Amino acid sequence: MIYYDKVSKTYPDKTIALEGVSFSVEPKEFVTIVGHSGAGKTTLMKLLIAEDRPTEGAVYFESANIHKLGKGATAKLRRRIGTVFQDYRLIPTKTVYENIAFAMEAVGRKDKEIASDVPHVLELVDLGHKIWNFPRELSGGERQRVAIARAIVTQPDVIIADEPTGNLDPTNTYEIVRILRKINELGTTVLLTTHNKGVVDAVGGRVITMEKGKVVRDDKDGKYVL
Ligand code: ADP
């Protein structure tokens, strides 16, 4: 489904972020990408949503070279990939409902569908009771659950969660991991990046370890060796 083929990325200031990275991800897999800060994890994710291009090599999504797609096809690809980031990226002036509704409007969903899907997706992240609150009235863990709800409400094929627990305490971290696993069990491919050993141990499953822009391990059954 996703294939990184000998991908290298050197930024304009000559920083080498990725070097000869190859791996593939099958539909419905849960892959955790671990590595210290600066190892290249975020760069990997940015290439997948065509926010940046590789210097060498190619990234494929269902056999299409992502960086050879036209504008329309790139927009379509991005709709198939939901994103969750460390800093939540909610709109502070909108309620929880409006934040999620906004993401649905952006992809052309009708008001009726929005009204019925938003409460449903909030139930999935155990936040039905916060639907009319503003982000500032929520804890970090709750904000991240809203961000996850927003990412999945358009039913993407893949969720990228880039260091989603970076600002959270262990209890909230575990809750986010549990929700991501649940989403994966419902059939969505999940790519999770983290530098946190506790997260890796809680997730289990496949772990790809990055070091200085290279894949140094790819284990089927989750180990954190750094
Ligand atoms: P990680 O997500 O594992 O912390 P990143 O992919 O963010 O790693 O960064 C990999 C390397 O690329 C780091 O050395 C970082 O400083 C560098 N880097 C990231 N983005 C840029 C950029 N836009 N310009 C220059 N260097 C960058």
Image (cartoon, rainbow, N blue to C red):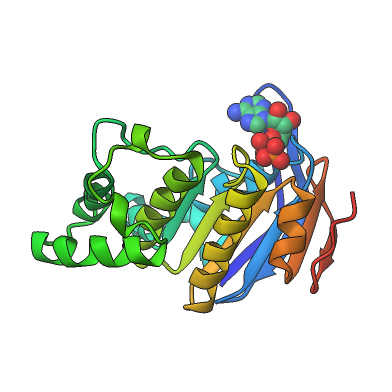
The residue sitting at 83% across, 40% down in the picture is 212
Quarter location, residue 4: bottom right
Task: Determine whether 171 is above or below 40 in the image.
Answer: below
Q: Quadrant of ligand 1?
A: top right
Provide residue 154's location: percent of width, then percent of height. 31, 63
Using the image as rendered, state which of residue 6 and residue 81 is in the foreground: 81
Task: Determine whether 21 is above or below 212 in the image.
Answer: below
Provide residue 90's location: percent of width, then percent of height. 36, 38
Provide residue 47's location: percent of width, then percent of height. 57, 48
Task: Determine whether 32 is above or below 214 in the image.
Answer: below
Provide residue 94's location: percent of width, then percent of height. 24, 37
Does 101 sit left or right of 14 as displayed? left
Using the image as rendered, state which of residue 13 and residue 188 is in the foreground: 188
Residue at far top of view: 13
Q: Is residue 176 visible?
A: yes
The residue sitting at 53% across, 55% down in the picture is 160
The residue sitting at 78% across, 46% down in the picture is 35
Quarter location, residue 73: bottom left
Q: Is residue 11 visible?
A: no
Identify the image quadrant of the N terminus. Answer: bottom right
Does 131 sit left or right of 115 as displayed? right
Residue at far right of view: 225
The mark tally for this picture is 0
Task: Determine whether 192 is above or below 14 in the image.
Answer: below
